[in-house]
Image (cartoon, rainbow, N blue to C red):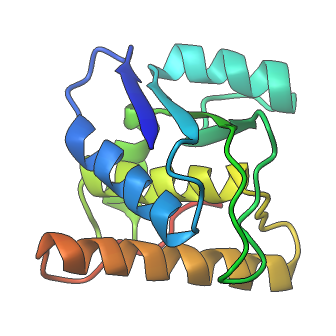
Amino acid sequence: MAIDVNNESGIDIDERAVLDVARYALARMRIHPLSELSVIVVDADAMEQLHIQWMDLPGPTDVMSFPMDELRPPSKDDDEPPQGLLGDIVLCPEVAKKQGEEAPTGHSMDEELQLLTVHGVLHLLGYDHEEADERAEMFGLQAAIIDGWRAEQGLTGPSPAPTVR
């Protein structure tokens, strides 16, 4: 899996964890190992510009996803997953820090960025949370991926609760 993490935010983040959780999520979703993903970390001003340009919504947001080849997980275990460019995930650590602090369980900015990375990956793979049934499916999958990754990393304590709205 070719995953690039480019931190343009000026804020120190755990880039290794973002890379690792993205790789884990893509493997768990059975995405072709030669597929490519870009994760860009930006400041609040840059995120606000993207949010206005692409969503016509004011203010910075936590995560945005920009799919390229519209790859989807294979439908059966024996299907060969297609290879391609997944697209870009854009993260904002300033928003992630605030959301982590406000979460019911309270967690760090880096834990929130890991959660948002998985959330962004799922959006790139076609998942959404507009309708109640879509939300249940996406957030359940998101929790399972985060829990599996945390267990693989030997991390203890509660997993971060979803804060994405």
Is 53 rendered above or below residue 20? above
Q: Nearer the viewer, residue 96 or 152?
A: 152
Q: Quadrant of the N terminus?
A: top left
Residue 63 position within the rendered picture, expressed as x and y whole percent measured from the top left: 58, 42
Can residue 14 be seen? no
Is 112 rendered above or below residue 87? below
Q: Residue at x 21, y 75 (%)?
A: 152
Q: Quadrant of residue 93?
A: top left
Residue 68 position within the rendered picture, expressed as x and y whole percent measured from the top left: 77, 33
Residue 142 position within the rendered picture, expressed as x and y whole percent measured from the top left: 53, 73
From the viewer's perspective, is 113 left or right of 10?
Answer: right
Number of numbered discs overlaid on the protein picture: 0
Q: Nearer the viewer, residue 92 or 123?
A: 123
Q: Residue at x 82, y 18 (%)?
A: 53
Q: Residue at x 33, y 43 (%)?
A: 19
Q: Quadrant of the C terminus?
A: bottom right
Q: Quadrant of residue 5?
A: top left
Residue 67 position within the rendered picture, expressed as x and y whole percent measured from the top left: 75, 38
Q: Residue at x 44, y 19 (%)?
A: 43
Can residue 47 be seen? yes
Is 59 rendered above or below residue 14? above
From the viewer's perspective, is 126 left or right of 7?
Answer: right
Q: Nearer the viewer, residue 3 or 59?
A: 3
Q: Quadrant of residue 21?
A: bottom left
From the viewer's perspective, is 19 left or right of 28?
Answer: left
